């Protein structure tokens, strides 16, 4: 339990580490006497990032100061009823002095398992047709998705993580050196999923291959670029997409630009304020999307079309375009510098683990996330 406890003096990045390390889905804020002060969920973190907060900001700016709690002596049946009626997956149990004694999970109390029948992606599409010119000469005779990161081709990493997340069918759009990708991945059975290849006879952009899927998806579709290496929580993206009932949801990374000079603010010819080495914060497209079937149907058939086109055409529509802030590890393997950085990060993440955990991809990705938040 202690892994998910933090103090009110902690920052948001510490809350993220606690949420992931504690494996309870929440971080519990306590005072020095272990008395409950608040609770933070993954949703609280992402809402804070959307509001412009930074990982270095205090947890007090995002925590729920009046969380649902229960007495540690409450019968299990009553705990289950309280969790269900509150729509919560976890909550703290406290004693008579409001000290946190335990954090309980609904799934642990009921021994429920994920049947895959509730809400899930109908399928996923990986865009893997690019030539990877920025990675030449590495990609002269090798498609970019087969470039290795940590001893495994990037696209295999993507497929394995999607399969682990419960995606049962993965479409892969291929063009450049397509045969090599098809030969390496096969039909997907060895990964526990089904792989269907979509051959682009001409380059269709970052969204055009959606029109090559013969049947309209029955539910949300996950689309991602084939050069993205990430530990994003796909289930959290889906939950966010469904909660906001958006036409499509764009995953976005938090990017900061540090200005190395003093910036002068003016009104007319006169200086009114001086900002010393300020930074600017942006949410940038991460190349990962959740799309409703209606959004997929908007993509024109067999012609070049980009995700930016689909996004811009729906900015003022209802339902519109939601933005899902990503606090997990993310890298665009598009240049030699980014590739080297990702390889180094993965190596360092493995080195922090012991024994067999170094081969446990879930443990490795947890370490990547914690290094990202550090």
Image (tube, rainbow, N blue to C red):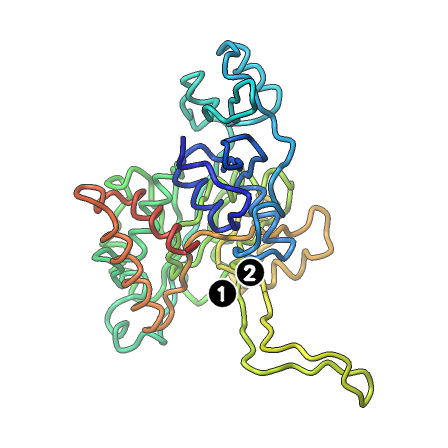
Residue at the (40%, 30%) spot, across then down: 1
Q: Is residue 73 above or below residue 54?
A: above
The image quadrant where one finds the C terminus is: bottom left
Mark 2 vs 1: CB contact within 8 A: yes
Foreground tag (2 vs 1): 2
Upstream in sequence: badge 2 or badge 1: 1
Left or right, 164 with respect to 355, comes to right
At mark 2, the secondary structure is helix
Q: Which mark is residue 307?
A: 2
For disc 1, the neighbor class at 10 Å (few under 14, some 14 to 19, many from 20) is: some
Viewer-closest of 373 and 320: 373
At mark 1, the secondary structure is loop
Q: Which mark is residue 205?
A: 1
Viewer-closest of 266 and 86: 266
Query: How far from the left and from the top, in percent, is residue 331?
Result: 40, 61
Specify the quadrant of the image occupied by residue 233.
top left
């Amino acid at each position: 339990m202690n892994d998910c406890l933090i103090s009110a003096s902690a920052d948001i990045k510490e809350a993220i580490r606690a949420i992931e390390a504690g494996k309870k889905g929440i971080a519990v804020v306590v005072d020095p006497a272990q008395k409950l002060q608040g609770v933070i969920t993954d949703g609280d973190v992402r809402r804070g990032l959307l509001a412009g907060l930074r990982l270095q900001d205090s947890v007090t700016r995002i925590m729920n100061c009046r969380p649902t709690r229960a007495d540690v002596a409450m019968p299990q049946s009553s705990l289950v009823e309280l969790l269900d009626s509150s729509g919560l997956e976890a909550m703290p149990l406290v004693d008579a002095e409001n000290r946190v004694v335990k954090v309980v999970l609904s799934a642990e109390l009921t021994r429920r398992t994920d049947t895959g029948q509730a809400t899930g992606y109908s399928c996923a599409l990986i865009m893997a047709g690019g030539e990877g010119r920025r990675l030449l000469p590495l990609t002269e005779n090798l498609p970019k998705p087969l470039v290795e990161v940590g001893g495994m081709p990037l696209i295999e990493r993507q497929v394995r993580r999607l399969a682990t997340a419960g995606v049962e069918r993965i479409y892969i759009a291929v063009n450049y050196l397509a045969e090599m990708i098809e030969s390496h991945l096969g039909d997907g059975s060895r990964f526990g999923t089904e792989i269907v290849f979509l051959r682009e006879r001409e380059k269709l952009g970052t969204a055009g291959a959606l029109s090559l899927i013969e049947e309209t998806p029955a539910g949300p579709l996950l689309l991602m670029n084939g050069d993205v290496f990430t530990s994003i929580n796909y289930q959290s993206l889906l939950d966010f997409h469904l909660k906001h009932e958006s036409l499509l949801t764009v995953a976005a990374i938090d990017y900061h630009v540090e200005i190395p000079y003093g910036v002068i603010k003016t009104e007319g010819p006169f200086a009114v304020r001086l900002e010393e080495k300020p930074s600017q914060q942006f949410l940038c497209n991460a190349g990962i999307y959740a799309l409703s079937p209606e959004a997929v149907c908007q993509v024109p058939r067999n012609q070049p079309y980009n995700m930016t086109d689909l996004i811009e055409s729906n900015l003022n529509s209802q339902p519109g375009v939601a933005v899902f802030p990503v606090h997990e590890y993310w890298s665009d393997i598009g240049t030699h510098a980014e590739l080297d950085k990702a390889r180094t990060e993965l190596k360092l993440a493995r080195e922090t683990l012991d024994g067999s955990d170094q081969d446990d991809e879930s443990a490795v990705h947890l370490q990547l996330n914690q290094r990202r938040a550090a």
